[in-house]
Image (cartoon, helix red, strand yellow):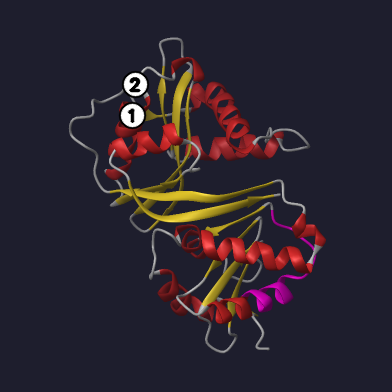
Amino acid sequence: MRRARVLGTRDDALVRNLLAADPVGNLFVASRVDAGVLWRGSPATLYGWPGDHPRHLLHAGSNLVPVFAPCEPGERDAAIAAFADAVGPHRWCQSIVGHSEGALALHRAFAVRSRSYAGQREIRPRQPLMVASEVPADLPDAPVRRITMAEFASYQSAAIAMYIEEVGMDPTVGGGRAGYRAHCQAAVESGRAWGVVDDTGHVVFKADVGISCGRIAQVQGVWLDPRLRGRGLAAPAMASATRQILEEHDLVSLYVNDFNTRAVRTYLRTGFAIVGQLATVLY
């Protein structure tokens, strides 16, 4: 069996060419390439298969993210087996994320090989991948703006509430408090946190640019105060955030759990269209 190999800076052009085949779906890995994953000393690794001239990729860090080129199932299975051999049996990742078919196939193969991958906490097999290039003109504006450090405490509380609601666990427990605070602070200080602040100074809506690469931004961490839900406020707020993000990008993307039907309807109304389907395996 041909082995996977660790890719480096000499593979930069090849990797970028593979990722360009689906710039929205491959946005995370492309952003990691821009951040230096191909450089020696990176905390994550990018594998390629087959080793001589890779057609398939695996980002291995806190997330496992496969990128499979169009191929027959047998070729994909061979790539997955090679990636499993390269990564090894001990699980370091917190999740597997990617296009549904490939991500779920990767999880099944890894779980058979290693018990550490078989103890997943949750599988979300259908997550619509959505993209917008404009916002319908009939949606009213909401007072969305960049969050500042003056609102940091309220923004962080909103971010924690969103994470608990979305992932089912508190990101600040088990020694995670400092790391999550740093994550939130970086979002605010870099201008990637957008929201609505009420008259009392509380963040009641938030949406972050979690990833950007080239002219594409991916929105993450969308949250509306539960006390305000059901009042028709989500669509105008999301529309205003999207309009402002589009001033600096050509496309805004996001992905959402299919069972969150209210959010799916909001995004469709806001101008997003479904262009694919992702899956997430949470550990």
Numbered label tally: 2
Is label 1 in contact with label 2 (beta carbons under 8 Å)? yes
Q: Amino acid at mark 1?
A: Ala
Q: Is residue 138 visible?
A: yes
Query: Which class describes the residues within 10 Å of circle 1: few (<14), some (14-19), or many (20+)?
Result: many
Q: Amino acid at mark 2?
A: Gly
Q: Tell me where residue 235 sits by quadrant.
A: top left
Residue 141 image point, x, y percent: 25, 26
Residue 155 image point, x, y percent: 52, 26
Q: Is residue 6 visible?
A: no
What residue sits 30% from the left and 31% below the top? Answer: 240
Residue 194 among those drawn in magenta: no
What residue sits 44% from the left and 25% below the top? Answer: 205
Which residues make up the magenta segment? 80-93
Decide if residue 15 is on the left or right side of residue 114. left
Mark-to-mark CA distance, 1 and 2: 7 Å
Decide if residue 270 is on the left or right side of residue 276. left
Could you say which is closer to the camera, residue 95 or residue 99? Answer: 99
Above or below 20: residue 185: above
Decide if residue 132 is on the left or right side of residue 97. left
Above or below 155: residue 102: below
What residue sits 24% from the left and 39% below the top? Answer: 135
Above or below 200: residue 278: below
Decide if residue 91 is on the left or right side of residue 270. right
Residue 88 among those drawn in magenta: yes
Residue 23 image point, x, y percent: 39, 63
Q: Indicate which disc residue 49 carries.
A: none
* Tag 1 residue: 235
* Tag 2 residue: 232
Residue 182 image point, x, y percent: 62, 38
Could you say which is closer to the camera, residue 63 or residue 231? Answer: 231
Q: Element type at marker 2?
A: loop
